[in-house]
Amino acid sequence: MNALGSHILAELNGVSSEHLNDPAFLERALVGAAQDAGATIIESSFNPFAPHGVTGVVVIQESHLAIHTWPEHGYAALDVFTCGSAIDPAQIVQAISESLGADSCETQRIDRGEQTTPTQAASGQQGAMKRSIWFTDRQDDIALSLRHAGVLFSEQSIYQKVEVVQSYGYGKMLLLDGQIAFTERDEFVYHEMIAHVPALHHPSPGRVLIIGGGDGGACREFLKHESINEIAVVEIDPTVTEACRDHFPTIANSLDDPRVQLVHGDGHAFLESSAEPFDLIVVDSLDTSGEIPFGDQFYSGIKATLAPGGLCVMQIPAPTLSPVRFTQAVKSIQDVFTHTSPYLAFLPTYSTGMLSFALASTTPHTLERDTTSLSALHYVNDGVLGAALLLPTFVQNLIEE
């Protein structure tokens, strides 16, 4: 009996969770199986989900392959459809099962369009395959997706999962626990704004403490100030530094400057043990969608470690992402510092596109210097600097509530 095509539904069990949570590996398995069977690849799209699982589709000239995985159960549902009789979907399913190392593969075959007369399958020439593997950063009720070409580095440290992913539009990306820390294309926005705003509100900073910042980006920007002669970088996770030295050397090489002391340890403990005060203290810590990670005790430790006239700055939740958490963070800082000034920056690869910082001190915030002496700035200029502490009305209203 003639049929338009053959459709196989397969259930794969006993597959390693690592394979089932790796979109790049799954793409290679499905595309390779289809090519080995003689299919013509048109496009592929693989998307990971939080906290685990992948859905992937490979469009072939003869129809499609699709997979959805449950890594926590070692299970994957596979769907292979081929038109005509030239390509055997059973061969594709078997090859995928072997690539994934499945303990078992149960299949159901359905002949589609049995009551019709099939026509000859299309035979157009194969063009360049379009790869579509996506990383998605999900926070609260919003997500940012970037198409990427594969994972270059992945290691689970004792603190977090550290990854470097090669994206198409933004170059290499550093991910911490599945959240974008920065990308090569626009990291300068974050690092310039977290460094130069506090530095230029100080008449002549000499000693700087960076809590976090193991990538070297903020350190690179502070080194552009001639008055700064000592920078302590206290990064709790050495894996972050390792990944950045290997994959972001133009950023991480600032950590090798003779003015820089790199310490892998806890920032809070470093504050408590510090014998000399700092002119500037920066909390370069990735904001997450969970609870605010710092409180009065931590901010009081910063205050006690600042030199007279010193300033601190930290990233806080963005008002567009979570107005409640933004307000809570500002109020928590205001409980310790008499002068607290939130400020904003705009970064395409941050959820909602808006970054939020807080500049804090025991003295009023006065712009002491301009950007004349600074080189290689891509975001900060005198206009941006002069307007940095001015806020949109909706943000002012959040602070005043």
Image: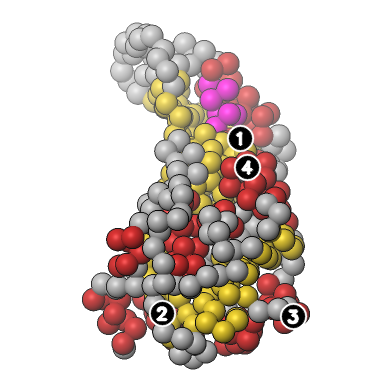
Q: Earlier in the sequence, mark 2 or mark 4?
A: 4
Look at the picture and state if 22 lies above or below 90. below
| Image point (67%, 41%), residue name | 246
Give yes or no for contact between labels 2 and 4 (Cβ–Cβ under 8 Å): no
| Image point (50%, 63%), residue name | 195
Residue annotated with mark 3:
275
Does residue 278 appear left or right of residue 45 in this picture?
right
Does residue 41 appear left or right of residue 101 in this picture?
left
Name the amino acid type tagged 2: His
Task: Please rate how many residues cluster around mark 1, counting C-alpha atoms within 10 Å: few if below 14, some from 14 to 19, many from 20.
Answer: some
Residue annotated with mark 4:
249
Comparing 63 with 301, the one in front is 301
Q: How is the image coloured?
A: secondary structure
Does residue 379 appear left or right of residue 300 in this picture?
left
Task: Please rate how many residues cluster around mark 4, counting C-alpha atoms within 10 Å: few if below 14, some from 14 to 19, many from 20.
Answer: some
Residue annotated with mark 1:
25
Q: Earlier in the sequence, mark 3 or mark 1?
A: 1
Question: What's the CA distance linking mark 1 and mark 2?
Answer: 52 Å
**Nearest to viewer (mark 4 / mark 3):** 3
Residue annotated with mark 2:
365
